[in-house]
Amino acid sequence: MKKVLSLFLLFPALVFAQNDQIKSAEDFMQEYFQLFDDKQWDSVLEMYTDDSQVVGFGSSIMSLPKVMKPVMDERSKAENISQNINVEWIETQITGPNTALVTAKVIDSISGENLTRITENISTFLLEQTDGVWKIKMMINNQNFPILNGKNIGEKFLMNNAPASRRFSLSTNIMYDFMCSMVDYNKRNGLSPEELGNIVGENYSKNWERSRTYDNLLIDFSNYVIGITTYVELVEKNDTTLVVKILPPSVSKAWKVTRNDMVSFTQNMWYQIARNMESDCTITDDGRYWTVVMNKK
């Protein structure tokens, strides 16, 4: 009975202690975001443990300081750029005597001449406390582009956000629909998919500098292809050959366009870009995937 009574008396103290830990952890995170907003980069780096890691900035677990340092350098060097870190909410769970799990939603806005970038970051931080000092041990970041509803928008008409992967899939579908409609329109007006691909490719290749040749085509096309399809498989990449397998556009019945039309259009478009950089391009279709081959001339 005495043990039960002792535990009963200790319970409020434990609750108050946990509440103090929660407040302490959230104050630490608010300070972290404020230092980031103020561009106090040395102080920000001091808030990481030496072995801190991050998930969400690539396909593997990486060193948090090494990932954040280039971000900080970029923002430090940028001229006439303003940034704003808006913390919308913070939720905290105490997971041990000296650890806490903090999740925060942050809107990161950067603006300047010819630049506006707003991202929504829902990040989870594992905090570790040593000698009363919190530090970030692990960060898991989920970045998206926000949907911002005005204050006067009624609940019935609010727009909800979707995962970044879903929004990217929708974007590629819209892009492919536009390409199909363009091929369809030109076919009906006497211009073949091959001819249209040559015209578009010749014009678009102006954005790909000839002086950069094949070596930079490897870099630029690799970056380009991950932005136009939801599936990319790198088959071969070396000093003379690039082979990539991708999921091609689905062709809507709304357009009088065949799958072969889209292969012809795309191959000729990409061939003109590759030719401008001393390479060539072929596409083969196995009925599900396209295999894109670029060879150095």
Image (cartoon, grey):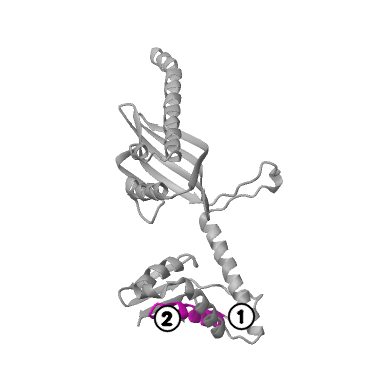
Amino acid type of the residue that numbered disc 2 sits on in the rendered structure: Arg
Residue drawn at (45%, 22%) of the image: 15
- Queried whether the magenta region covers residue 234, the answer comes back as no
Q: Which residues are magenta?
A: 259-283
Amino acid type of the residue that numbered disc 1 sits on in the rendered structure: Val
The tag on residue 88 is: none
Residue 232 visible within the image:
yes
Q: Quadrant of the C terminus?
A: bottom left
Locate residue 228, reporting x and y percent. 50, 67
Q: Nearer the viewer, residue 147 or 114?
A: 114
Determine crowd level at label 1: few under 14, some 14-19, many 20+ residues with C-alpha closer than 10 A.
some
Q: Nearer the viewer, residue 285 or 48?
A: 48
Locate residue 218, reporting x and y percent. 37, 71
Residue drawn at (54%, 72%) of the image: 249
Give the image quarter of residue 223: bottom left
Question: Gap between marks 1 and 2, in whole Å?
Answer: 26 Å
Give the image quarter of residue 183: bottom right
Q: Secondary structure at mark 2?
A: helix
- Queried whether the magenta region covers residue 277, the answer comes back as yes
Give the image quarter of residue 280: bottom left
Q: Secondary structure at mark 1?
A: loop
Which residue matches tag 2? Answer: 275
Front position among marks 1 and 2: 2
Residue drawn at (43%, 79%) of the image: 276
The mark nearer the N terminus, 1 or 2, is: 1
Left or right: where 203 falls relative to 71:
right
Q: Nearer the viewer, residue 280 or 231?
A: 280
Which residue matches tag 1? Answer: 257
Left or right: where 19 falls relative to 137:
right
Magenta residues: mostly which secondary structure?
Answer: helix
